[in-house]
Image (cartoon, rainbow, N blue to C red):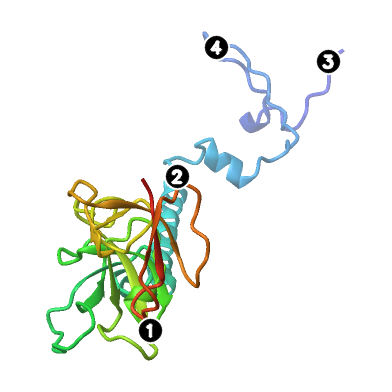
Amino acid sequence: MPYPVSPDAGVPEHQPARPGSGQFATRSQSPQPPGPQRPAADRARSGEGGGRRTGGRRDWIWSLVAFLVAAGVIGAVGVHFFGPDATEETTAVWAVDACAGPDPTAKDAGAATDTYRPLTCDDAEATVTVLDIQDAVSVGQAHCPTGTDLVFQKDGKAGGVTQAVCARNLSDDHPGDPGMGGGQLVIGDCVNEDGQEAKCSAEDTRKVAGLTIGGSKCPDGTSDRLELGFDAQRSYETICLGE
């Protein structure tokens, strides 16, 4: 019994596709469900999308350069306004451990002592370092520390509100050391028969064992006393002489 024939059986486009010679039939690809999408930033870091990403690195470098420049400007401004004042470092003042030197501009020929001016210790004209500064009417009344080579008034004049400066030479010449014949008379120095200071190496000198005022007792080891009496130009009245 013949089978019924479809009305479209003769139409080519309705015929089932057949593999050609030497070809195999392929399975149709079914659509895949969409998977999770990676963020654009991740795709950029991994190099997807073509081309290398360099803009971020350049921005970071320029940001660092700008920060360093700003920090340098701020630091310079701070040093200028709040840093140490260079003029203060070079200003010479009267003070212990400061230095001084002869004042070539002094015009007072009747000055009680040589006139000195304060100088920085690295000044080529500085000749002495200041050991002490004392209120005194005269340089002879000052009680200067051991090692004082010379004593002078700050302004070269005695009396008034001036002060006595006890100073030591910056050179190796130290007449104020005990027994060297200079500076203020101190214990360990030597004097001649008139009570004038002299080098201990000189003849006919006696060593000073003590200096007293007002009839005070001389120290042990004193063999003789040299009474000089009161004098406003010195701080002692009696020289106690040793052996």
> How far apart are the alpha carbons under marks 1 and 4?
132 Å
> How far apart are the alpha carbons under marks 2 and 3?
73 Å
Q: Amino acid at mark 1?
A: Val
**Do the CB atoms of the residues marked 4 and 2 lie less than 8 Å apart?**
no
| Of marks 4 and 2, the one in the foreground | 2
**Do the CB atoms of the residues marked 3 and 4 lie less than 8 Å apart?**
no
The residue singled out by tag 1 in the image is: 137
> How far apart are the alpha carbons under marks 3 and 4?
33 Å
Q: Amino acid at mark 2?
A: Arg
From the viewer's side, name the closer residue of 213 and 171.
213
Mark 2 Cα-neighbour bin, 10 Å: few <14, some 14–19, many ≥20: few
Of label 2 and label 3, which has the lower sequence position? 3
Position of 52 compared to 41: left or right?
A: left
The residue singled out by tag 4 in the image is: 23
Q: Amino acid at mark 4?
A: Gln
Mark 4 Cα-neighbour bin, 10 Å: few <14, some 14–19, many ≥20: few
The percent coordinates of residue 208 (x first, y second) are: 36, 54
Q: Secondary structure at mark 3?
A: loop
Which residue appears at 27% of the width and 61% of the height?
149
Of label 1 and label 3, which has the lower sequence position? 3
The percent coordinates of residue 1 (x first, y second) are: 87, 12
**Do the CB atoms of the residues marked 1 and 2 lie less than 8 Å apart?**
no
The residue singled out by tag 2 in the image is: 53
Position of 86 compared to 201: left or right?
A: right
Of label 3 and label 4, which has the lower sequence position? 3
- Image position of 156 with respect to 120: above or below: below
| Of marks 1 and 4, the one in the foreground | 1
